[in-house]
């Protein structure tokens, strides 16, 4: 299933609702385009809602890391919300669970941005 | 499933679409062989990563080069071969993606994932001179074991004829 991405504003935070697969090709490209577009618009507080993302491959992981680094380099924060079991397991075995701020409650996630 | 071995092979173009094609083909074989949902996910992911490796690192995304995918189902396991037309590589030269200095690397996790998700994994020099990834997963069934501790069994399909 192709990746879908829609943005909404929640205070100073942009919540990106993602659904589908973040994999080599269109999925990774859309994630990159979405994050880069937000940074161009000076939106540097980004919360990725991955509730409907059921599959990420190494290319998708790379794109998440690339986005995280790009946002940090702009002085912002990129955090993750609502991981599915497969995605959580993937981030755990790659040790990225310790890199990303991960939340299971949107209000908690929104409140964590400064 | 009979006790006969089965062999499938396909030659893939060096293009992104080949990654999905390879994954879908191997998923069908894995499902037919009786693997449960979790193992099918791990096998599918490993095939994806093997073909991505061949596409990107082996064949350098050059469209004139081919990727050779072969799948064997024996009485004991599903064996997958992914061969490229690159110059090959040595496993010990691959950086550890879990090392602190590599955690924020945007690439280099494919080999790690294949190793984590399959029971056996190796890279040898193939007949093309390129890298040949050889990986396998033990078939589910009575008495089956999963050496890496991740090959959970959701069902116990009939294995003997």
Image (tube, coloured by chain):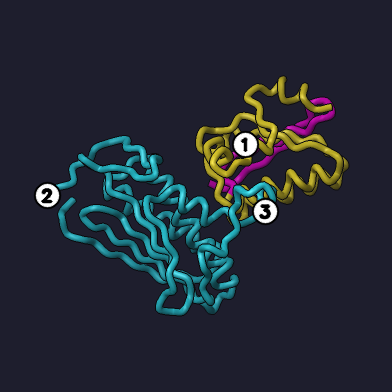
Chain colours: A yellow, B cyan
Question: Where residue A71 appears, x then y in whole percent?
Answer: 80, 43
The answer for which chain carries disc 3 is B
Q: Is residue B129 visible?
A: yes
Closest to the observer: A70 or A107? A70
Image quadrant of residue B9? bottom left
User: On the image, numbered disc 1 is attached to which residue?
Assistant: A97
Q: Disc 1 versus disc 2: distance between alpha carbons?
A: 45 Å
Question: Where residue B92 appears, x then y in whole percent?
Answer: 53, 63
Q: Disc 1 versus disc 3: distance between alpha carbons?
A: 15 Å
Q: Establish if B9 lies above or below A7.
A: below
Residues packed near mark 3 inside 10 Å, few (<14), some (14 to 19) or many (20 plus): some
User: On the image, numbered disc 3 is attached to which residue?
Assistant: B106
Q: Is residue A74 left or right of residue B141?
A: right
Q: Disc 3 versus disc 2: distance between alpha carbons?
A: 47 Å
In the rendered view of the protein, which quadrant contains the C terminus of chain A? top right
Q: In the structure shown, which secondary structural element does the residue marked by tag 1 occupy?
A: helix
Q: Is residue B17 visible?
A: no
For the residues carrying marks 3 and 2, which lies nearer the camera in this image?
3
Q: Establish if A4 lies above or below A83.
A: below
Magenta span covers which residues? A1-22
Q: In the structure shown, which secondary structural element does the residue marked by tag 3 occupy?
A: loop
Q: Which mark is residue B161?
A: 2
Q: Establish if A53 lies above or below B161.
A: above
Q: Residue at x 69, y 50 (%)?
A: B101
Q: Which mark is residue B50?
A: none
Closest to the observer: B95 or A21? B95
Q: Residue at x 46, y 52 (%)?
A: B115
Q: Is residue A9 magenta?
A: yes
Of pointers 3 and 2, the one earlier in the residue sequence: 3
């Amino acid at each position: 299933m192709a990746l879908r991405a829609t943005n909404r504003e929640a205070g100073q935070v942009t919540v990106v609702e993602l659904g589908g697969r973040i994999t080599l090709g269109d999925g990774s490209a859309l994630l990159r385009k979405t994050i880069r577009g937000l940074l161009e618009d000076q939106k540097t507080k980004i919360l990725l809602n991955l509730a409907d993302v059921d599959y990420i491959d190494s290319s998708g992981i790379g794109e998440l890391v690339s986005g995280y680094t790009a946002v940090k380099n702009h002085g912002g924060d990129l955090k993750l919300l609502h991981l599915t079991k497969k995605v959580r397991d993937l981030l755990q075995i790659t040790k990225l669970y310790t890199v990303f701020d991960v939340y299971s409650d949107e209000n908690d996630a929104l409140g964590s941005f400064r | 499933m009979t006790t006969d071995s089965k062999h499938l092979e396909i030659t893939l173009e060096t293009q992104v679409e080949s990654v999905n094609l390879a994954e879908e083909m191997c998923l069908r074989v894995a499902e037919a062989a009786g693997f449960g949902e979790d193992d099918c996910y791990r096998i599918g992911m490993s095939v994806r990563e093997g073909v991505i490796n061949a596409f990107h690192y082996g064949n350098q995304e050059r469209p004139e080069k081919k990727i050779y995918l072969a799948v064997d189902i024996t009485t004991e396991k599903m064996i997958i071969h992914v061969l490229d037309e690159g110059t090959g590589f040595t496993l010990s030269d691959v950086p550890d993606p879990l090392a602190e200095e590599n955690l924020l690397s945007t690439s280099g996790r494919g080999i790690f994932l294949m190793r984590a998700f399959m029971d056996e994994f190796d890279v040898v020099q193939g007949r093309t001179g390129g890298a040949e990834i050889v990986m396998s997963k033990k078939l589910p069934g009575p008495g089956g074991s999963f050496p890496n501790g991740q090959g959970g069994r959701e069902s116990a399909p009939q294995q003997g004829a």
